[in-house]
Amino acid sequence: MAEAPSTGDPQPHDQAPGNRTKRAKKTLADGFLEAIRADFRAHGAGVIAEVRAEKPDQYLKLVLSVLPKDISVNINNLDALSDDEIRQRIRGLEAVLRPFLEKPGFAKGLAQPGGKDGISQPAGGAGPQAPH
């Protein structure tokens, strides 16, 4: 097998034509991102507020574009709880909130302690227990 003629100086790996292209792209991308960062630092908050006010659809697109793609949201995790578990959670919340609700004039119209288990009763005609 014939060897390639040697010039005496080994060629650095990053001098290969393909590597120069990669390095140039990375340098260009790094420069572009730094310019974007600088512009955002100077004008970002104002532009975001302007887009939110004048183009809410574009603002929503922006918000959605920065959310993780695999986001899993469980908005109503109460479906998995039994009625007794829900009552226990309500009792716990009432215990935490009671000192605030007992302030004079604060709890007008709210359920008062002493109802069934201290839990307000469902509104008539609403919810799954409503007469049909």
Image (cartoon, rainbow, N blue to C red):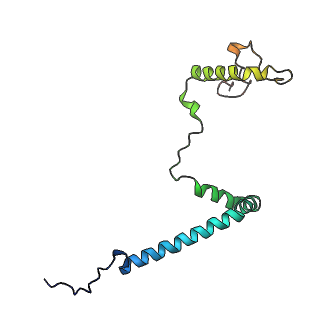
Across and down, in percent, residue 81 comes to 55, 26
Residue placed at 33% from the left, 75% from the top? 13
Looking at this view, is 114 or 14 the one in front?
A: 14
- Outermost top residue: 114
Up-down relation of residue 28 to residue 82 (above or below): below
Across and down, in percent, residue 67 comes to 57, 53
Across and down, in percent, residue 10 comes to 29, 79
Up-down relation of residue 69 to residue 47 (above or below): above
Residue placed at 82% from the left, 21% from the top? 103
Residue placed at 72% from the left, 64% from the top? 43
- Outermost left residue: 1
Quarter of the image that includes the N terminus:
bottom left
Up-down relation of residue 64 to residue 37 (above or below): above
Across and down, in percent, residue 21 comes to 43, 78
Quarter of the image that includes the C terminus:
top right
- Outermost front residue: 8
The answer to whether residue 115 is left or right of residue 66 is right
